[in-house]
Image: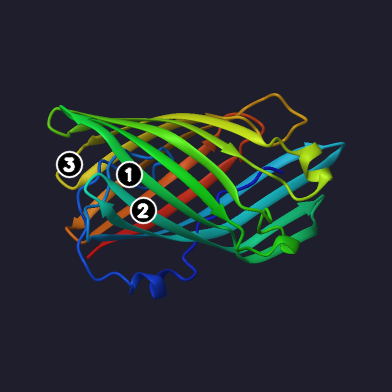
Amino acid sequence: MKNVFKRSWGVLVMMGMVAAVGVGQAFAGPPLATDDAGIVDVGHLEVELNSSYVHDRERVAGDNIRHSVTDGEVKLTTGLLKNADIFLTVPYTFSDRERVNGDLTGSSNGFGDMLLELKYVFFEKDGLALTLKPTMLIPTGKYSAGLSEGRWQFGGALIASKEFEDGKYTLHANLGYEHHDYRTEESRVENRGDLWSASLAGEAKVMKNLTAVLDFGVARSTDASTSTPAAYALVGARYELNEHLDLDCGVKIGLTEPEDDVAALYGIVLKF
């Protein structure tokens, strides 16, 4: 069973209270899985409170296996330099359950591994921005409960965003790589350590404060037993309630077997 990116409402309000300053302009945001090249201005802060419900079903050796996850995240982003920002993601799993032929065979909940990321914009001209994003996964989750990989992990991505018609339409493209150093020999045999990903997303302003989004992505599966990549399609919308608050929702559909069947995504972005 593949890993699910953990999202949470858990510690959301508590950490949201940390915010006390404004936020700069960015190209995009949730519910897109594809990242945008925009950054938060120096001295400003943005808080994302995201959550999801994921469902997956498969048949293995005659057994019907159902996997469901309700989880969420708090993501804090602040400007670091004129052309760079830094953000920390704190995930929490409310319920991660697996059933085989209707019988509960696994259940867990708790904090997962935190993710620390840096975005550096190295090119910006005529609505086009190119950004580098190194990432570091911090093993803060409980390894014995399956909520952590148990080791520090590293990766990175190249991000491009291009605006059209004064921002009415925007395209985003990501190329990513992660290296995973698993703790046990069994995990190293069953899971790939070098993972690549690519995605493309578009957004269009359909009303003054309403933006529709569409996202496609593909990634090398962590499961070493299959050569089929994990691929998804995502459709959603983002509504700017006011200058301090965005609401978003979306549906993510798995296009290949290694990807989860369906995920409902929802969240808010706070701008103080």
**Secondary element at image label 1:** strand
How far, Cα to Cα, is label 3 from label 2?
A: 31 Å
Q: Which mark is residue 86?
A: 2
Q: Residues within 10 Å of mark 2 (few under 14, many from 20)?
A: some
Relative to 155, say whether 9 is above or below. Answer: below
Of labels 3 and 2, earlier in sequence is 2
Tell me which label, 2 or 1, sits earlier in the chain: 2
Asked whether, in this view, residue 164 is left or right of residue 196, the answer is left
Residue 173, given in percent of the width and then of the height, sits at 38, 29
Q: What is the distance, in whole Å, between disc 1 and disc 3 at their CAs?
A: 11 Å
Q: Amino acid at mark 1?
A: Ala
**Does residue 199 appear left or right of residue 189 in this picture?**
left
Which quadrant of the figure has residue 204? top left
Question: Mark 1 = which residue?
Answer: 237
In space, the residues marked 2 and 1 are separated at their CA atoms by: 25 Å
**Quick one: SS at disc 3?**
loop
Which quadrant of the figure contains the N terminus? top right
Across and down, in percent, residue 48 comes to 36, 58
Residues at circles 3 and 2 in contact by the CB criterion of under 8 Å: no
Image quadrant assignment for residue 186: top right
Residue drawn 43% across the image and 58% down it: 88
Q: Is residue 172 left or right of residue 217?
A: left
N-term-proximal mark, 1 vs 3 = 3
Mark in front: 3 vs 2: 2
Residue at numbered disc 3: 207
Quadrant of the frame with the C terminus: bottom left
